[in-house]
Image (tube, rainbow, N blue to C red):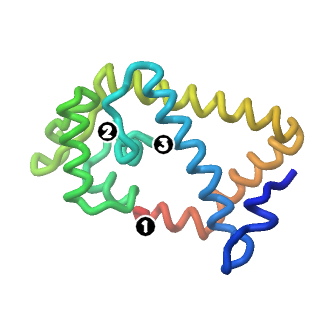
Amino acid sequence: MSSDLTTYPDTALGPPLFGALMRMPLDAVLDRMLAGLRAAGFTDLVPAHLGVLRYPGPQGRRPSDLAAQSGMTKQATNYLLGELERLGYLVREEDPEDKRSKRIGLTARGTAAVENIRETVRQVETELEHQLGTKDFARLRQLLVDLNATPFVRDFHRRGG
């Protein structure tokens, strides 16, 4: 199974490389996540909010750790956290271990949104399993698990990326 996009791209750069081949499905998943949220009544969320709500989620984390993980500046992260707090998805509470810092907590609304995101992604996985076939989808999933265990990816996330 191939698409015109991956076999005959209309670009001077040639066929997409590994990064683009990973990004294109991610873009489709993110779009589906937003559609699922909107269908469930979470119409006030925008794509930028997914950077905060995405796996592993903000629960119990410090804003600075979330900023490092998402690749955003602390200022941008705090802006998004402020929006999500104002919209009722999370709260920032005093860190019991460090009174100078805050910890993020999901509200019931925030937990419901994250659960909706996870259910939507499960639906996407089921759809892709049907499209690719059970064996190929299982292989793809295992390859992604293996990829995430490589030093290339693991070390990036340990550095806070």
Q: Secondary structure at mark 3?
A: loop
- Whether pointer 1 and pointer 2 mark residues with C-beta atoms closer than 8 Å, the reply is no
Instruction: Name the residue tied to disc 3.
Output: 55
Q: Of residues 106 and 103, which is closer to you in this image?
A: 106
Up/down of 138 relative to 115, above or below: below
Instruction: Name the residue tied to disc 2.
Output: 60
| Quarter of the view holding residue 103 | top left
Mark 3 or 2, which is nearer the eye?
3
Mark 3 or 1, which is nearer the eye?
3
Type of amino acid under label 2: Gly
The mark nearer the N terminus, 1 or 2, is 2
Up/down of 11 relative to 72, above or below: below
Percent x, y of residue 78? 20, 50
Q: Distance of mark 1 from mark 2, alpha carbons?
A: 19 Å
On screen, residue 92 versus residue 141, left or right, reads left
- Identify the residue at horizontal 14%, vertical 39% (top origin): 94
The mark nearer the N terminus, 3 or 1, is 3
On screen, residue 110 versus residue 132, left or right, reads left
Assign the C terminus to one quadrant of the image. bottom left
- Identify the residue at horizontal 63%, vertical 64% (top origin): 20
- Identify the residue at horizontal 27%, vertical 62% (top origin): 73
Judge the density around disc 3: few (<14), some (14-19), many (≥20) Cα neighbours within 10 Å: few
Q: Of residues 131 and 142, which is closer to you in this image?
A: 131
Q: Secondary structure at mark 1?
A: loop
Type of amino acid under label 3: Tyr
Percent x, y of residue 14? 72, 77
Instruction: Name the residue tied to disc 1.
Output: 159
As drawn, the residue found furthest toward the front would be 10
| Quarter of the view holding residue 131 | top right
Judge the density around disc 2: few (<14), some (14-19), many (≥20) Cα neighbours within 10 Å: some
